[in-house]
C-alpha cells in the first residue's frame, strides 16, 4: 500500500524510521473514481495531490466554455494550485481524476510538519517549487513560440506513456493546438520515422 | 502416459469493457494463479462471453492502438469484427474464423464490430489471446494470418463424437493452420452430447481450457460449466473431456518461454529499457500511422 508515496518520501527526506511511520499515520489517502474532482475553480486549494495510482489533470475553462489543460499528473507526480494555497485565494483551476486514482492529500500543515522534522524535505520542497516555475516558463515559451511538432516532442519526453492513456483531444488541449493539427504532426513524424 | 490433473478451475472474473465494443472477462494475467509467467507463452486472455449488443449505427470497438513484442489471436464464436492495421491489412473476422496477428516489432491496429453486424446487433462472443514471442523474435517484422473457418484443419472424432478444429499445433498428427514461433497448440473441441475427446501434451507445457458452450466432465470426475477456465498441472500428459451436452471448448497448450517479462499496456518486452524504447518508438511514429 502506498509504495510510490513511501518511495517519494524516503527519497525527499531523511526521516528516522519511527518518524516515517508516524507521518504515514497522518497521511490522508483517497480513492477517486474517474470523473471525480479534487478541486473546482472558485474554491481555495488546500492540498498538494500526490498521484499514487491513476491519472489527474489540472485544467482551466475559458469564457466560451473551452477547456485548457495545464498539467497531467500520472503516478509519482504532484499537482496542486500552489498560488491558491499560498495567497489563500480562489483557484482558476479544476483538478479531475481521468482514471480511477489513489491520491495522497498533503495539506500545508502536513508539509510544514514534515519540513520541521526533515531539513532535507524542506529543501526538496523548495526545489520542487522552483522546478515547477521552470516547467511553467518552458511551457509559456513553447506556447508562444514553438511549432506544434516541437511542443509534441517535449510532451512525449515528459509523459512517455500518456498518449496511450488520454484521448487525443486532451493531448491537443495541453499542447494548445487542435486535434487535427496533432494528427497532422503525428502523421508527419510517422512518414519520417516509419521503418517497415 | 500419466493423467494430467486439474490445478484450478477459475470462474469468469467481473467483466469490463475494452473500448465500447468488447465486454470481457480477463482470465490471464489477472485471474487467480494465471499470471504471465505461470501461463507463458499465453500472456493475456480476454473472453467476451456471449453478450447481446443492440443495433448501433456507429460501430462499437477499440480505436487505434499499438502492440509490440507478441502476437494477438482473435477467435470469433459469435458476431463479426472488422479490423485495419498500419501495414495495410484489413478484413473481417467472421463466425468461426481466427485472426493471428504477429505484432512483433510493432503495429498499429483498430478493431470494430463489422458494419452490418453493428446495424442489426446480435450475439457477440469472442476470445482474444496474446501469445508471447521469444526475445530473438520480438523485433521481427509484423505479419498477419487471416484464417477463415474453411481453412482450419478439422479432425473428425470417432463414434460421431464431434470434431477438433486445429488452429495451431497438432492433434492426432493433424497439423494446425497457423504458423507459430514456439510450440503452441490451440484448438476448438466441438463435441456432441456425451462425445469424448482425449488430449496429450508434454507435461511441462502450460495447458488450460475454456468452456465456450455447454458443460463438460474432465478425466471422468470434475464437472465444469460454461464460461469457466481450467488450468492443468504441469505433471502428466493426457486428459479427457466428455461433453454433458453439445459443447465447444477452447484448448490451449504451449511450451513456456523462460525469459524475463517486462510489460506495460500494449507492449510486452524482456527489459524495462526495451519498454521505454517501445513507448518512444510509438510516440515518434516508428509504428507508422493509422487514421482513427
Image: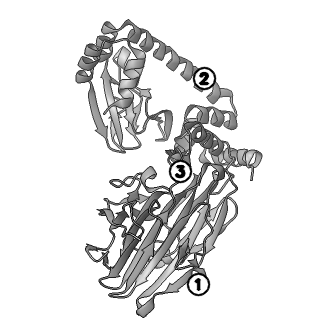
Residue at the disc numbered 3: B266
Q: Secondary structure at mark 2?
A: helix
Q: Nearer the viewer, mark 2 or mark 3?
A: 3
Task: Measure how far apart labels 1 and 2 are at the Cα level.
Answer: 59 Å
Q: State which quadrant residue B226 falls in.
A: bottom left
Q: Secondary structure at mark 1?
A: helix
Q: Nearer the viewer, mark 1 or mark 3?
A: 1
Badge 2: chain ID: A
Q: Secondary structure at mark 3?
A: loop
* Residues flagged by tags 1 and 2 on a common chain: no
Residue B286 vertical placement versus B14 (above, below): above
Q: Residues within 10 Å of mark 3 (few under 14, many from 20)?
A: some
* Numbered mark located on residue B150 in the image: 1
Q: Position of residue A5 (x, y in %)?
A: 36, 27
User: Is residue A74 in view?
Assistant: yes
The tag earlier along the polypeptide, 1 or 3, is 1
Amino acid at each position: 500500500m502506498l509504495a510510490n508515496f513511501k518511495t517519494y518520501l524516503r527519497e525527499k527526506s531523511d526521516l528516522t524510521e519511527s518518524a516515517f511511520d508516524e507521518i504515514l499515520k497522518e497521511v490522508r489517502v483517497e480513492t477517486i473514481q474517474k470523473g471525480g474532482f479534487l478541486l473546482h475553480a472558485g474554491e481555495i486549494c488546500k492540498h498538494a495531490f500526490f498521484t499514487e495510482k491513476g491519472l489527474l489533470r489540472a485544467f482551466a475553462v475559458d469564457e466560451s466554455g473551452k477547456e485548457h489543460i495545464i498539467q497531467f499528473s500520472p503516478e509519482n507526480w504532484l499537482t496542486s494550485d500552489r498560488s491558491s494555497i499560498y495567497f489563500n485565494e480562489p483557484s482558476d483551476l479544476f483538478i479531475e481524476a481521468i482514471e480511477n486514482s489513489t491520491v495522497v492529500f498533503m495539506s500545508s500543515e502536513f508539509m510544514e510538519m514534515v519540513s520541521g522534522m526533515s531539513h532535507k524535505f524542506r529543501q526538496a520542497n523548495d526545489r520542487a517549487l522552483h522546478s515547477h516555475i521552470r516547467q511553467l516558463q518552458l511551457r509559456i515559451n513553447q506556447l508562444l513560440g514553438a511549432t506544434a511538432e516541437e511542443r509534441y516532442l517535449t510532451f512525449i519526453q515528459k509523459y512517455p506513456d500518456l498518449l496511450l492513456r488520454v484521448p487525443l483531444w486532451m493531448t491537443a488541449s495541453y499542447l494548445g493546438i487542435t486535434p487535427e493539427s496533432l494528427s497532422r504532426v503525428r502523421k508527419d513524424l510517422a512518414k519520417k520515422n516509419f521503418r517497415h | 502416459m500419466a493423467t494430467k490433473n486439474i490445478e484450478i478451475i477459475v470462474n469468469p472474473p467481473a467483466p469490463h469493457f475494452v473500448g465500447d465494443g468488447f465486454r470481457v472477462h480477463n482470465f490471464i494475467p489477472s485471474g487467480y494463479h494465471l499470471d504471465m509467467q505461470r501461463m507463458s507463452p499465453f500472456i493475456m486472455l480476454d473472453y467476451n462471453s456471449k453478450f447481446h449488443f443492440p443495433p448501433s449505427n456507429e460501430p462499437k470497438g477499440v480505436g487505434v492502438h499499438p502492440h509490440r513484442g507478441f502476437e494477438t489471436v482473435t477467435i470469433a464464436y459469435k458476431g463479426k469484427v472488422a479490423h485495419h492495421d498500419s501495414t495495410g491489412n484489413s478484413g473481417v473476422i467472421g463466425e468461426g474464423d481466427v485472426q493471428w496477428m504477429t505484432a512483433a516489432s510493432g503495429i498499429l491496429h483498430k478493431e470494430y464490430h463489422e458494419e452490418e453486424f453493428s446495424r442489426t446487433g446480435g450475439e457477440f462472443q469472442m476470445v482474444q489471446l496474446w501469445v508471447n514471442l521469444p526475445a530473438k523474435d520480438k523485433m521481427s517484422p509484423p505479419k498477419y494470418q487471416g484464417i477463415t473457418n474453411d481453412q482450419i484443419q478439422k479432425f473428425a472424432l470417432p463414434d460421431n463424437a464431434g470434431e477438433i478444429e486445429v488452429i495451431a499445433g497438432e492433434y492426432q498428427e493433424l497439423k494446425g493452420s497457423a504458423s507459430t514461433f514456439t510450440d503452441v497448440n490451440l484448438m476448438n473441441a466441438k463435441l456432441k452430447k456425451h462425445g469424448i475427446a482425449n488430449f496429450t501434451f508434454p507435461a511441462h507445457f502450460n495447458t488450460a481450457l475454456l468452456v465456450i458452450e455447454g458443460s463438460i466432465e474432465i478425466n471422468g470426475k470434475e464437472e465444469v460449466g460454461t464460461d469457466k477456465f481450467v488450468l492443468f498441472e504441469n505433471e502428466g500428459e493426457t486428459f479427457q473431456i466428455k461433453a454433458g451436452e453439445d459443447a465447444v471448448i477452447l484448448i490451449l497448450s504451449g511450451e513456456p518461454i523462460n525469459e524475463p517479462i517486462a510489460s506495460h499496456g500494449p507492449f510486452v518486452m524482456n527489459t524495462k529499457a526495451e519498454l521505454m524504447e517501445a513507448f518512444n518508438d510509438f510516440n515518434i511514429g516508428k509504428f507508422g500511422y493509422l487514421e482513427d
